Amino acid sequence: MSTQFFENQEAARRETSRLVFLFGCAVVGIVGLLYGLALFLSNLQKTDAYGRVAAMPIEYWQPELLFQVVLATFAVVAGGSLYKTLQLRGGGAVVAESLGGQLIATDTNDPEARKVLNVVEEMAIASGTPTPPVYLLANEDGINAFAAGFTPSDAVIGITRGTIQRLNRDELQGVIAHEFSHILSGDMRLNIRLMGTIHGILLIGIIGYFLLRSSMFAGGRRGGRDNSGAAIVMAGFGLMIVGFMGTFFGNLIKASVSRQREFLADASAVQFTRNPDGIAGALKKIAGLDEGSILVSPSAPQASHLFFSKGLSGGLQSMFATHPPLAERIRRLDPSFDVSVLTSAGTSQTESAGAAGFAGTSGAGSHTGLPAAPSGPAIEQVGEPTAAHLEYAAQLLASLPSAVVTACHEPYGARAVLYALLINRDADARRRQLDQLENFGEAGIADETRRLLRDTERLDSHVRLPLVDIALPALRNLSQPQYAAFETNVQVLIEADKRIDLFEWTLQRILFTHLRPHFDRTASRVRRNLRLSKLTAECEVVLSVLARFGAAGDAAAQKSFDQGAGALPDLSLELLPKNRSGLTALDDALSRLARVESRVALQLLSACAAAVASDGFVSEAQGEMMRAIADTLGAPMPPLLPGQRLF
């Protein structure tokens, strides 16, 4: 099994550890500066017996003063970091809105916004992630974009007006693929932690600024003999200087952490689209624009490391660059490109290239030669979608009935589509389900569900889960009461025939894995460092359920279980009886496994794939079930392509 996705996750985790180390070094440096300032100010306040300022030798070692400085620094830095981190708990939407982003309605009729949403939907289906909401930075003329959030469930894509207006479809696809790489690799979580952590360092300078302003405002009201006013002014200046050093440290940390990961995201985007000209073309247009990729938002400095290309200008930006030079990025993507032409590209030339229209509203772009399926097994594409998945997603979207897609793009219709997917073909069960919607659903929702049934019942089964991915952004716009009613109705519809089939379980698992954290802000996003040896019971349940579903008899189930257990040699596992191997038990086990570290998820997914593929045949329902398990473990799994083996 390919481990690149999980290695990327571990690399992001190591970068988080490095961030903590660098942050600690910065705090130690700041403590030293503040201690020096405190020594100076304390000496300034010393007076002789007549109340006059006395020049006295400085005692450099004052443990009590040092302790006070350390305590005050810790309180300010830790308090500022904690405040910012809590402020960012809302996920990517908080970041996007702080930059002036406005949510693009999923049912928008604006052609420019629509083409962006189409590209994002293709990418989401191809990568096996929920479709992220898209925020438009309408006041930004430069070409730039970003991805922000803690997990794929709360990720958002931000994009500037200049990006939409100036890039053709292949270029836009390259930029969006770059941002999806950040979503899949764990960079988003690292970047948002970076914002929260560094804010505490910057807060010292902010305090100094306000202290200086207040002291200068009140200075005229103090007596001439009062030396405290001068001390406060000097304290304000000193804190501002220390704050400048904090900014220096913060920018240095951001540059250190993020620069190399931009090269990795560029390479992943090329792998995803199989079109280096797309992302390279976007970078060339940035180089040829007067605005480049610069953002005017006052919040841009704190989020500079999130952007597709550098978002700030100024003489010191090259020293603290969070992105590699444009020329170097372009050269890696297009070795034959003459970098010297960048200086003479000209805005008009760039804009005329950007005016080229988009090749329709869906499709994998103008490049050709995509394979029908990737060469490797599906489990090797976890977190690493290919151009074949992108082509598959484009074809799938083109095949969907327009009425169903339109309904998925607004909250009312999205609920009706999900209800329609769960309506049973058995007459008695169907009657009970529609009665539930008539009595407890939204006004008219039962009629809307009946209308959509004509299209959803004719759909191929493999397009059902992608409809969930498409509908998720609209469903996030529900109010808390609407969501509570929706969740209840889904559960009742599933249980209407007194049994839960694999598709029903998979749908509700994926749906609520991504919706519940949005509506329940108390849900933890912290990954737990648990070993598999502590999760033996949960592993037994997961492998037993996978072994028994689809197995023809106990012997086949035992073979499947043994195949999966063989991938976990350090555990002593036994196949559980049928009464302990149901979908309810699987739900409980996965809830406990949901936040394990990526290396544990890798081991468990390998075992699951081995169990499912033990007989050499993987049904569509089993493939969907694997997608739901991978989703729960935080490992986005692209769709299983026709003719592709799982393991």
Image (cartoon, rainbow, N blue to C red):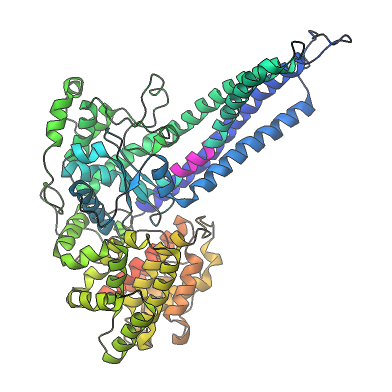
Count of numbered marks: 0
Locate residue 529 relative to residue 410 in the image: left or right.
right
Depth check: 42 or 297 in front? 297
* Residue closest to the eye, 300 or 584: 300
The answer to whether one can see residue 167 in this image is: yes
Q: Quadrant of the C terminus?
A: bottom left
Residue drawn at point x = 28 percent, y = 84 percent: 424
Characterize the magenta stretch by its predominant secondary structure: helix
Q: Quadrant of residue 105?
A: bottom left
Residue 442, given in percent of the width and then of the height, sits at 35, 74
* 52 vs 15: above or below: above
Query: What's drawn in magenta, residue-wise?
Result: 191-198
Q: Up-down: is 509 above or below 207?
A: below
In the depicted view, which residue is nearer to us: 637 or 402?
Answer: 402
Residue at the outermost front position: 221
Tell me residue 517's x, y (percent).
46, 60
In-front residue for pair 346/502: 346
Name the residue at 21% across, 68% down: 404
Q: Is residue 396 left or right of residue 28?
A: left
- Visible residue check, residue 616: no
Spot the residue most to the bottom: 428
Where residue 77 appears, as percent x and y from the top left, is 61, 36
Spot occupied by residue 616 in the image (x, y as percentages of width and height): 26, 74
Q: Is residue 610 left or right of residue 591?
A: left
Q: Give residue 556's quadrant in the image.
A: bottom left
Give the vertical position of 525 relative to 544 (above or below). Answer: above
Quarter of the N terminus within the rendering: bottom left
Give the residue drawn at x 23%, y 79%. Answer: 450
Task: Specify whether residue 646 is painted magenta.
Answer: no
